[in-house]
Amino acid sequence: MRMSFGISSAREIWQRAMEEEFCHLNGVKILIDGFVIWGRNAEEHDVRLENFFDHVRDTDLKLNEKKSRFNTNRVSYVGHVLTYEGVEPSPERIKAITDMPDPNNKAALQTFLGMVTSLGKFVPNLSKLIAPLRKLTEKE
């Protein structure tokens, strides 16, 4: 598949095309511009990886070897870390939030709230905690 550079929907088109192409393979997930192959154990993982590579060869898809990582039990993905134990916030995302300067205007407060909200599933009662700050963004 070829697309012109600069098409704003290119990422979504690529995601959908890859999901359709690889949807029949168990243990394969498309994450933005990459693939994650997993298994409950090393044997299942290796079988799934072999099936993935067989399909890549059949479709003549080119992979970037420099971006490839194998035999890892941690994958960073959009501010999260995926592990065999579950999902956790990435240390980089937490550091970015804690290192942010104190918001001094509405736009900076909205940026801060967006960053915090992106990790909301890890903070119990986050909506109650940030409700007073949200009210400040509603005022003109």
Image (spheres, rainbow, N blue to C red):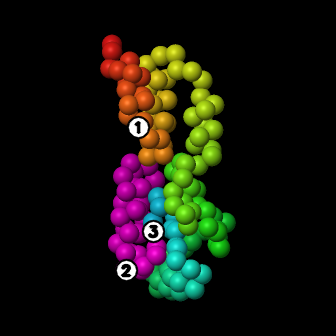
Q: Residue 79: x and y, percent?
A: 54, 48
Q: Which residue is mark 1?
A: 125
Q: Quadrant of the N terminus?
A: bottom left
Q: How many marks?
A: 3
| x and y, in percent, of residue 44 in the image | 53, 84
Residue range highlighted in magenta = 1-29
Indicate the amino acid at tag 2. His
Say if 60 sits above or below 105 in the image: below
* Front in this rendered view, residue 133 or 29: 133
Q: Residue at x 41, y 76 (%)?
A: 22
Height in image: 29 above or below 125?
below
C-alpha separation, residue under disc 2 versus residue under disc 1: 38 Å
Which circle's residue, 2 or 1, is located before the other in the chain?
2
Please tell me whether residue 58 belongs to the stretch shown in magenta. Answer: no
Q: Secondary structure at mark 3?
A: strand
Report the front residue among 67 and 133.
Answer: 133
What crowding class fits label 3: few (fewer than 14 Cα within 10 Å), some (14-19), or many (20 or more)? some
Q: Amino acid at mark 3?
A: Lys
Within 10 Å of disc 1 (Cα), the crowding (few <14, some 14-19, many 20+) is: few
Residue at the spot 56% in from the left edge and 80% down from the top edge: 41
Q: Would residue 30 be visible to someone looking at this image?
A: yes
Neighbourhood count class around disc 2 (C-alpha, 10 Å): few under 14, some 14–19, many 20 upward: few
- Residue bearing mark 3: 29
112 with respect to 94 (left or right): left
Q: Which residue is mark 2?
A: 24
Q: Amino acid at mark 1?
A: Asn
Mark with earlier residue (1, 3): 3
